[in-house]
Image: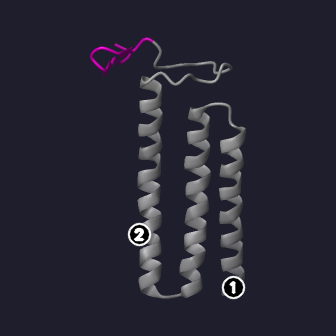
Amino acid sequence: MTEIIVIILSSLGALFILLAAVGVVKMPDLYLRISVTTKAATLGIGLILLGAGIYFSDAAILARVIAIIVFMLLTAPVGAHMIGRASYFTGVKMWKNSKIDELEGKYDTKSHKLRSED
């Protein structure tokens, strides 16, 4: 029974990583690519790690796997946000069919300050 759970988790993880790779190729701009890879790849890596932790069925390995998963869930969105923010402020263009640019006109390139709605 454990082997079936490991196979399912590993297969789902590989599928999500494959979807992330396809998303990197198919998405039209950097911002959408970041979104796809952050969500799908993080979930895929987490599922594969969880499968590995269950496979080895050792408390020390499972504790490390859980720590790695928590670390990935905490750091991947922050890293993606920082890459997206730096890309926007350095002038990387959004996809031509993007409807809303909520930061347009709110960033001062000289002082590097971002104004709020007020």
Residue 35: percent from left, percent from top: 57, 41
Q: Residue at x 72, y 39 (%)?
A: 26
Residue 117 covered by magenta stretch: yes
Q: 10 Å neighbourhood of mark 2: few (<14), some, or many (≥20)?
A: few
Q: Label 2: state its secondary structure.
A: helix
Callout 1 amino acid? Glu
Quarter placement of the N terminus: bottom right
Which region of the structure is painted magenta?
A: 105-118
Q: Report the number of numbered marks.
A: 2
Q: Residue furthest left?
A: 111
Instruction: Judge from the rendering whether residue 62 lies leftward or rightward of residue 117; answer left or right.
Output: right
Q: Which residue is mark 2?
A: 67
Tell me where residue 12 sits by quadrant: bottom right
Callout 2 amino acid? Ala
Q: Which residue is mark 1?
A: 3
The secondary structure that dominates the magenta segment is loop
Please name whichever residue, 21 or 99, is drawn nearer the observer in this view of the structure. 21
Q: Label 1: state its secondary structure.
A: helix
Of mark 1 and mark 2, the one earlier in the sequence is: 1
Q: Residue at x 43, y 24 (%)?
A: 90
- Give the label on residue 28, or none: none
Q: Residue at x 47, y 73 (%)?
A: 65
Residue 106: percent from left, percent from top: 40, 14
Position of residue 12 relative to residue 74, above or below, is below
Quarter placement of the C terminus: top left
Residue 1 covered by magenta stretch: no
Residue 48: percent from left, percent from top: 60, 69
Residue 29: percent from left, percent from top: 62, 31
Q: Residue at x 47, y 42 (%)?
A: 80
Spatial CA span between label 1 and label 2: 23 Å
